Amino acid sequence: MAFYDLAKQEREVLVKQIQAVILKEMSVANYTAILPYFADEDTYIRKAAYLAIGKIYKMDIGHLPNIIELLNNLLGHDDFKVRQTVVNAAGEIGKSDFTVVQSFFDKGLLDEHHAVRNAVIGSVKKMGEVNPSPVLAWAASYLQHPDKEIRREICHGIELRGRKYPQDILPLLKQLEFDPTKRVSSTLVHVIGQIAYKKGCLATVIADLKTWQNKELVDQAILEIIDVHERYKDFAVLTQQEAMDYISKHF
């Protein structure tokens, strides 16, 4: 039965059960009972499993060696869903301590399955929001990677931090302004648009774009910013017209 086919009380019981199983089996290095949760077809069961890892870590940091051993053992599993859950679990720990889980993201970026790589992006987003310094430093080291998909994924992964603190990621985004791959430059333009419509962000983004040298890409970014203010008008601080007026005055 799928997670959300259960009643709320039943879901709460299941979440506690998953956490108890992981805590018990992890301590004796027996992952037979844990694996089904990491491999479940239901994404919400897998989510309950990786959130349980985060709760166990927060409950007692002394569990960390056992957690890392568990995740290392399962990262090489044939089932991509297991590897995806491992990366997401590492992301829960990385919100507090990125250094101890960095290797999972180095490997996840190179995984053959897109679901695992997407888990890296999602984890970078959630870690970068609350633990930006080490996460952004790690991300920066991949911006010139020869694999265009890795450059694109890193660009996408740092987006969420930029929605509140665009000044933190704009120097990284600028490194991609002359990227020769259309898929990367399109993602770059998208991210610029996404970090420009929140409170106080437009001024920061426009001021930074004035220092960029790729005028064609900057023009595309400006059009995206204007369009985003209409597409996200229910969430944007400024109306599309106000955004256009500001850009006309300051750019």
Image (tube, grey):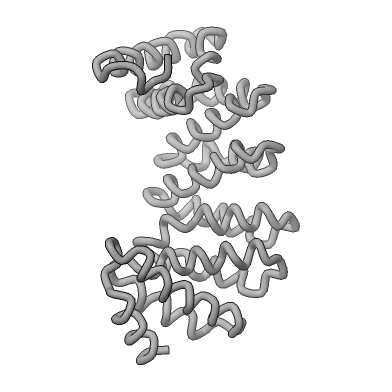
* Residue in the picture at 57% in, 54% down: 139
- Quarter of the rendering occupied by the C terminus: bottom left
* Residue in the picture at 29% in, 72% down: 200
Placement of 224 over or under 27, stated as above or below: below
Q: Where's residue 108, x and y in %?
A: 63, 39
Placement of 184 over or under 127, stated as above or below: below
Q: Where's residue 76, x and y in %?
A: 67, 25
* Residue in the picture at 42% in, 62% down: 162
Can you name the residue that lies furthest to the right here? Answer: 146
- Say how many tags the image has: 0
- Quarter of the rendering occupied by the N terminus: top left
Placement of 89 over or under 200, stated as above or below: above
* Residue in the picture at 51% in, 65% down: 190
Toward the viewer: 195 or 169? 195
The picture quadrant where one finds residue 110 is top right
Q: Where's residue 16, x and y in %?
A: 33, 15
Q: Where's residue 132, x and y in %?
A: 43, 53
